[in-house]
Amino acid sequence: MKYFLSSIITLLGIVCFSNAYAQLMQKSEADSLAKAKIQKNGLLNFDIGEAKLTFNAYADFGYVVGPQRTNTFYDYTTRDTVTQFGRRDFTSYPLYANQFSLSYAYIQAQYEIENKLRFRLAFHTGHIVDALYIEETPSTRIIRELALYYHLNKKWALEIGIFPSYFGAEIVLNKENLHATRAYIADFTPDYEAGLRLHYKLNEYNTFTAMVLNGWQVIRETNTTKAVALAWSVNKPDKIVGNWNVYFGDEQPLNVNYTLFRHYHNLYFRIWLSKRLMILPVLDAMIERKPPNGEVGWNKIIAPALSVRYGLSEHFGVAARWEHIYDKDDIIPEPYTGTANRWQSNSGTLTFEYLPRPELTFRIEGRYGLNKDAVFRGRNNEPTKEDWYGIASFSFHF
């Protein structure tokens, strides 16, 4: 896997260099089809006739301090007993404490003809990929995005392939979030999807999307049914930006003779109260039919959260987040606890950030969480109700 990704990176580098060199050699030709140039919206851009070829890169790296040390445990995701140093529970990042770690990185190529079509191909790596893509096939784990976006007309567009999810207020690109790390619930809701999306642009600020997907955060189909989803996106920069997402799917395991219907709502809106003050209210709510083991009814998850960010100046800011999760039924496998009350927690996060340039973000962050049952691990691997860490991180996006 490492060699494959390295080969892709090397190949892209050779292509970029070769094209750049070719364009420089043809600078004097007025009819040159491609002109290499560096712009703020891409690492490298090439104009190819009416199209534009853009290369982007992203990375998020940091050091985490926490109580976790060496521990031997049963990993419910890999379904194996492992021994690791610094491994944290119930999170994709920070996945390890007391060490430097790469949260997430990707390289992306995009070919676009404005208002006609866009094709993206992106490969990624990092601890977030290790944690969230563990059940995918080795050949697809490294794919962040492989999708074609085609404009049918000015109002309608069709998108098909593998792409980042609309679900969740906090995405895997932590630079785009208000905090260096994500809320617990963000790791338990879809981060990526495979399928088809039909977009309808109502006006300048509102877009509606209908989706047919392989399922709940899956590239490879895990049962015989497809999921459907709807989204309403509002985009008024510096005023209100957010989504209301709705999901309907059957989450039955393969080769069973019953259905596990799941219905999920995700709402989040970034609301600017002033030029410096922004709030981000979030609500995740889900119900799923109980398995046919004698019980009748529905399991449920409720997870509200609220973040507030205040810009101290052009380059400095501070943000705070409160989050709550109520999942006493163990709906989703990742936060499986095996305790009487399962997952019922409150958590707080405080973040200081420095933005020297639009491409760079430096953050120092602390977090404290408290669960109803002792589901976390302390310094000596003893069960504890408390979860805490400190992190210093930097990220860039070109």
Image: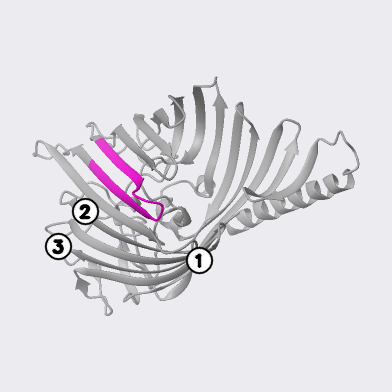
> Image quadrant for the N terminus?
bottom right
Residue at point 20%, 60% (across, down): 346
| Residue 325, numbered label | 2
Does the image show residue 224? no
- Which residue corresponds to mark 3? 372
Give the alpha-carbon distance from disc 3 to disc 1, as whole Å: 33 Å
Which element is circle 3 on? Answer: loop
Give the alpha-carbon distance from disc 2 to disc 3, as whole Å: 11 Å
| Residue 394, numbered label | 1
Q: Find residue 20 and report its horizontal and vertical position in percent.
A: 79, 49
Amino acid, disc 1: Phe
Mark 3–mark 1 CB contact (< 8 Å)? no
- Which one is in front, 86 or 256? 86
Amino acid, disc 3: Lys
Q: Is residue 138 above or below residue 81?
A: above
- Which one is in front, 228 or 243? 243
Q: Is residue 270 magenta?
A: yes
Is disc 1 surrounded by few (<14), some (14 to 19) or many (20+) residues within 10 Å? many
Q: Is residue 350 magenta?
A: no
- Which one is in front, 357 or 288? 357
Q: Nearer the viewer, mark 3 or mark 1?
A: 1
Is disc 2 surrounded by few (<14), some (14 to 19) or many (20+) residues within 10 Å? many
Q: Magenta part of the protein: which range? A: 263-285
Amino acid, disc 2: Ile
Q: Find residue 159 and report its horizontal and vertical position in percent.
A: 51, 29
> Image quadrant for the C terminus?
bottom right
